[in-house]
Image (cartoon, rainbow, N blue to C red):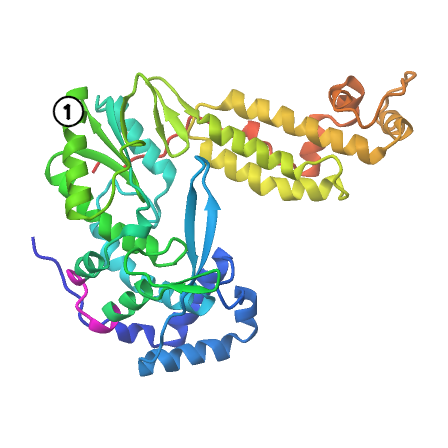
Amino acid sequence: MSCRVWYSLYDRLLYRETLLEAFKKVKSANGAPGVDGQSCKDFALHLDANIHTLLIELRGKTYRPTPVKRVEIAKPDGGIRKIGIPIVRDRVVQQAVKNILDPIFDPGFHPSSYGYRPKRSAQDAIAKATAFMRDYGLEWVVDMDLSKCFDTLDHELIIHAIREKVADGSILKLIRMFLESGVLNSGALEPTDVGSPQGGVISPLLANIYLDKFDQYMRRKGHRITRYADDIVIFKGSKAGAENVLEVATEYLEKRLKLTVNQKKTHITSLMQGVPYLGVVIRSGFTQIKDDRLQGFKDKIRRRTKRNSPVNLQKIISDLNPILRGFANYFKVANCKSVLQSMMKWIRRRLRSIQMKLWKVPQKLHRRLRQLGYQEEFQRIKMASWRNAACQYSHWAMPKKWFDELGLFAMDKIETGVLPPINRG
C-alpha cells in the first residue's frame, strides 16, 4: 500500500510562532537543565532574543545541537538507566520538529501501540491487554524485555524509516544531527554512533517510528500485541503458541531491528499465574497493584511526612496531594479499593503524628478536644509517640472530616476497577 510522502517541511520551522509554541510545551515539562546549566525559566527571561537567535540559525542552516548531559538514574531492579538531557534551545527545536512529524506518523502507527502518543495512556494499554486475555481468550502471554532499547536504536534504520514518509533532506539532516550530537559524561565528550538519548524530546517519537516496524510485522502475521514504548507483550491462546511467537519476535527484533532481547527477563506467563504489566498484575478475575509500586509509593510518602519536619501540616498536605492524586488516578484501573482505604488510614496516622509533635505538649491537644466539645478529664500522653498517633484522643482531635477540610486528597473516594474503553484494532 502506497503512502503519502512529504517533501517540504523545513520551512514550517522558520516562524517565530512555531518556536514559541514549542517552547511552551518544553516549559510545561519543566525538565532539568542541560550541560549549560540553563533552566527553562532562565531561557524565558530573554525569550524574544533566544527565539530570534534560533530563527537566524535555522534559516541560515547554521544551527548545531549541543551534546546532551549524561545523567544516570537507579532503576527499581537495581540497574542503571542512562538519561541524556539536551539544553533548552535544543529541546525547543526538537519539540518543533516533533510537532511537525507527529501528525504525519502517528495516524499510521499500530492501534495497540500506546506509549508517548497523543490521547493514549498506560491505562489504555492495560485495558487492551486485559481485553485480549479475558475477552479474546488469549491467556498465554510473552512478556518481552529489550536491553537498553533507546541506547541501541540504529541511526540508519531510523533515518530509513522516516524517509519512507519524509523526503525533506533538511529535516532528515536535522534529525541526524540530534542523533549524533554526542554526550558529555563527567566533562568528556562521547560520540553517539547509535541510540537516541532518553531525555530528548524527540526520542520517544523516533522510538515509536522505529518499533512500529515490529508492530506492523506482528500484525501482518496475525499476532495480537500491546506495546508501551519498549514494553512489549504478545498474546496467544496456548503455551505452544506463545513459545513459537517468542522465537518469531526475537528473530525480528534482533536480526531486522538490531535490538537485544534480554533473555533473563523475557518470559512466558499466563492469566492464571498473573501477568505483570505497567505497574499492575492482571489476573483472571481482578487486577492488583504490583507490590514494588506500592512499596515505592509508601517510601515516597515516608520521605514527605517525617515527624521532624519544621513546616506546618497545611504545607505538607499541599505537597502530598499531587502524589496521592497521581497514584490514585493511575492505579484506579486496578481493583484496589481496600488498598487505597488502607493507605489513606496510614497516611492520616502519619499526619496526626506530625501534628501531635508540632503541638509538643498534651495541653494543646486537650485544648483542641475541649474546643470540639469533649468535656472529660484527659490523660497526659506522649506527643511524640507513633503509637499515640492512633489513639482515641488523636482521632477525636483530628477526625477524617478535619483532613477533608484541610484539603487532603482522599484516594479512598476514587472509583476503582475502571478500565477505559478500548479501540478494537
In the image, residue 166 sits, relative to residue 231, either above or below, namely below
Label 1 SS: helix
Q: Give the percent coordinates (x, y) of residue 29.
A: 48, 56
Q: Which residues are magenta?
A: 163-171
Extreme residue in the left direction: 1
Q: Amino acid at mark 1?
A: Gly
Q: Is residue 165 magenta?
A: yes
Q: Give the percent coordinates (x, y) of residue 413.
A: 55, 28
Give the side of residue 26 with respect to residue 11, left or right. right
**What residue is shown at x 26% (from left), y 33% (from top)?**
263
Disc 1: which residue: 241
Q: Please tell me in which quadrant of the rendered image residue 350 appears.
A: top right
Give the side of residue 100 with respect to residue 287, left or right. left
Q: Please tell me in which quadrant of the rendered image residue 4 appears.
A: bottom left
Asked if one can make out residue 238 in the rendered structure from this viewpoint, the answer is no
Q: Nearer the viewer, residue 410 or 43?
A: 43
**What residue is shown at x 29% (from left), y 40% (from top)?**
146
**What residue is shown at x 21% (from left), y 61% (from top)?**
159
Asked if one can make out residue 47 in the rendered structure from this viewpoint, the answer is yes
Q: Give the percent coordinates (x, y) of residue 302.
A: 63, 34
